[in-house]
């Protein structure tokens, strides 16, 4: 199965099992907007809890807030979003489709990498056991030529983006002979800038309505509350403010399911530091955040850092944590050194003094900021992509299983009476009713036990607890594990401890120390 086929299957699976639905589907959906179903919302909440607790509980100097989505419109002038939160867009005159110019070029660059990978694979087959990949990459003229062309285009794109040179971006598209994926033609318009913020109005028209924006990042809600939190919390530098909330961007290239949405959720933490110490903290947060990802056990090689070619208007250093999705390595999280840009500009635009008095140096200054910013939805997609598997079993049957880390699994255990009689449903209900105070538990008595196991595998439930006639006699049940399908007899009294040992976030937090 190709990665593309696997991804299609995953998208269908998410809908079939109540994880993610297209928004307002009965009206044929709304592009790049999705709803989370009964399983999706549990997974998402668990991811948020993993992030929130790791920030606000494991760090004595990080606190959380929940700011409003609507903010004073001057906020977005101060932050630079009114002037500079743009995407470079280009239209194909034949298909009438609109694209992000940089994304068209990035796709072309990815194709060059695929070409190189194909050459390597061909050579591997040709040379067999004796194949030395490193040597081949270093010496093959064809690989060298493709790599040189790729690197040159990459550099031109970075230069054009940094200089905001739209004509240069268009010229790369022409020079690389990039065609529209729909019409197949190269009949391109000029490249134009397009602001990504959604506007709406507050107040009635008669009173004179004001244009306000749906926030494109949650970070600004933190910056405007810097003084409130610092003063009321008696916070001393360095300290952080964390927030989880919705953000909105009028994305033109909406692709890859929940990877790029118009309404999405962010988990952001702004860490305020002394000027001059920001690079030390930026490196520290890179390490901390990478450990947070890797603790989930999806394979260390599936993550990498990607430093930004074009720094955002507020940053002096920026990197992305990328995960190896079925459609390639893509950004999940950004770690940005934002200097004093935001607080400094809010000070300027609001006329309020936004400074910190440092008792150690006796000076007042605008703190510098290191930000960690991760998309909740991209994390959901990361977990689902890593967890989704189709397996052939020893008995020739097949199963689809979501190997979601137990701590994040939507349902922690299913209680299944073997038959619907002889007092087994009553005992199963008693077990469920006891466990449900601590965990999300399902009860299921419909269909054969094999079918019920499959249904639980498909939503990623780590434990299936089967109640049978022996349970009535000796107070034990069969516990079947999702990943290994191993079964063992466990005393009913021991179930809570067994579940706790696997689903507690503690086991993840221990890896972060
Ligand atoms: N405050 C900084 C900031 O917003 P960003 O790199 O634009 O930085 C941070 O966004 C994270 O938010 C990204 O790494 C990604 O996970 C998520 N994100 C951004 N745009 C998104 C979109 N359209 N759909 C889903 N997630 C998105």
Image (spheres, rainbow, N blue to C red):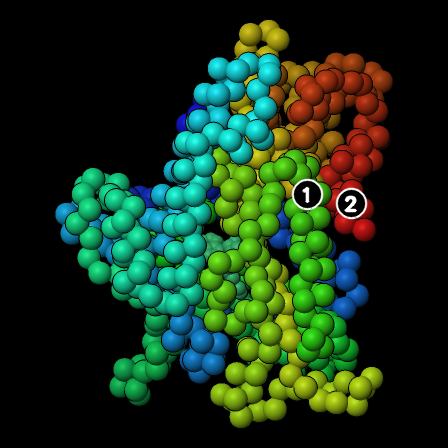
Q: Is residue 37 left or right of residue 403?
A: left
Contact? badges 1 and 2 (CB < 8 Å): yes
Label 2 CA crowd tier, 10 Å (few <14, some 14–19, many 20+): few
Is residue 168 depicted above or below 105 in this figure? below
| 464 to the left or right of 344 | right
Give the Cα distance between marks 1 and 2: 9 Å
Measured along the vertical axis of the image, is residue 9 above or below residue 80?
Answer: above
In the image, what residue occupies the spot 55% across and 7% down? 396
Using the image as rendered, state which of residue 348 and residue 212 is in the foreground: 348
Look at the image and tell me whether residue 244 can be seen. Answer: no
Q: Residue at x 48, y 21 (%)?
A: 123
Residue 201 is situated, as x and y percent measured from the top left of the image, at 34, 76
Instruction: Indicate which disc residue 294 carries.
Output: 1
Q: Earlier in the sequence, mark 1 or mark 2?
A: 1
Q: Quadrant of residue 102?
A: bottom left
Q: Secondary structure at mark 1?
A: helix
Q: Is there any visible trace of residue 494 in the rendered image?
A: yes
Where's the N terminus, which quadrant? top left
Viewer-side residue, 46 vs 490? 46
- Is 504 located above or below residue 399 in the figure? below
Q: Position of residue 444 (x, y in %)?
A: 60, 26
255 versus 200 height, above or below: above
Q: Answer few, some or many: residues within 10 Å of disc 1's Cα (few below 14, many 20 plus, some between 14 and 19).
A: some
Residue drawn at point x = 60 percent, y = 67 percent? 337
Where is residue 190, by image quadrant? Answer: bottom left
Q: Which residue is mark 2?
A: 511
What is the residue that sits farthest to the left in this orientation?
94
Q: Is residue 312 left or right of residue 205?
A: right
> Element at badge 2?
helix
The residue lying toward the viewer, choosing from 185 and 300, is 185
**At which x and y percent is residue 144?**
45, 36
Question: Which quarter of the picture shows residue 304?
Answer: top right
């Amino acid at each position: 199965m190709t990665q593309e086929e696997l991804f299609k299957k995953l998208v269908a699976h998410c809908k079939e099992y109540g994880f993610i639905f297209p928004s307002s589907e009965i009206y044929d959906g709304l592009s790049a907007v999705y709803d989370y179903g009964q399983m999706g919302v549990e997974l998402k909440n668990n991811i948020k809890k993993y992030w929130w607790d790791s920030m606000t509980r494991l760090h004595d100097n990080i606190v959380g807030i929940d700011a409003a989505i609507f903010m004073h419109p001057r906020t977005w002038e101060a932050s630079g979003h009114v002037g500079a939160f743009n995407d470079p867009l280009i239209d194909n005159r034949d298909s009438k489709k609109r694209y992000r110019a940089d994304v068209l070029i990035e796709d072309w660059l990815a194709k060059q990498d695929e070409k190189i990978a194909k050459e390597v694979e061909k050579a591997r087959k040709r040379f067999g056991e004796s194949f030395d990949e490193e040597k081949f990459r270093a010496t093959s003229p064809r690989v060298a030529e493709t790599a040189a062309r790729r690197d040159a285009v990459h550099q031109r794109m970075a230069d054009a983006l940094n200089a905001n040179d739209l004509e240069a971006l268009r010229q790369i598209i022409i020079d690389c002979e990039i065609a529209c994926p729909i019409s197949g033609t190269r009949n391109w318009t000029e490249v134009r800038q397009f602001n990504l913020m959604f506007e709406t109005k507050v107040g009635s028209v008669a009173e004179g309505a004001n244009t306000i924006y749906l926030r494109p990042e949650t970070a600004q809600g933190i910056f405007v509350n810097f003084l409130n939190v610092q003063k009321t919390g008696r916070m001393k530098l360095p300290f952080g403010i964390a927030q989880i909330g919705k953000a909105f961007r009028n994305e033109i290239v909406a692709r890859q399911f929940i990877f790029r949405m118009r309404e999405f959720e962010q988990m952001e933490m702004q860490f305020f530091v002394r000027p001059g110490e920001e690079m030390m903290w930026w490196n520290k947060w890179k390490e901390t955040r990478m450990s947070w990802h890797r603790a989930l056990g999806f394979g260390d090689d599936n993550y990498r850092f990607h430093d930004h070619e074009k720094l955002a208007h507020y940053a002096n250093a920026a990197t992305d944590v990328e995960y190896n999705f079925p459609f390639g390595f893509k950004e999940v999280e950004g770690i940005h050194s934002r200097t004093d840009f935001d607080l400094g500009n809010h000070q300027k635009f609001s006329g309020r003094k936004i400074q910190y008095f440092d008792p150690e140096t006796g000076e007042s200054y605008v703190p510098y900021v290191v930000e960690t910013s991760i998309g909740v939805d991209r994390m959901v997609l990361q977990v689902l992509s890593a967890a989704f598997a189709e397996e052939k079993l020893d008995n020739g049957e097949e199963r689809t299983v979501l190997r979601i880390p137990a701590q994040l699994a939507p349902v922690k255990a299913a209680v299944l009476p073997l038959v619907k009689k002889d007092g087994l449903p009553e005992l199963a209900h008693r077990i469920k009713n006891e466990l449900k105070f601590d965990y999300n538990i399902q009860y299921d008595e419909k269909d054969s036990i094999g079918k019920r196991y499959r249904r639980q595998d498909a939503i990623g439930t780590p434990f299936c607890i089967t109640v049978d006639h022996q349970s009535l006699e000796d107070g034990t049940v069969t516990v079947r594990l999702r990943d290994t399908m191993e079964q063992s007899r466990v005393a009913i009294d021991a179930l809570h401890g067994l579940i706790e040992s696997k689903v507690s976030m503690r086991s993840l937090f221990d890896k972060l120390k």
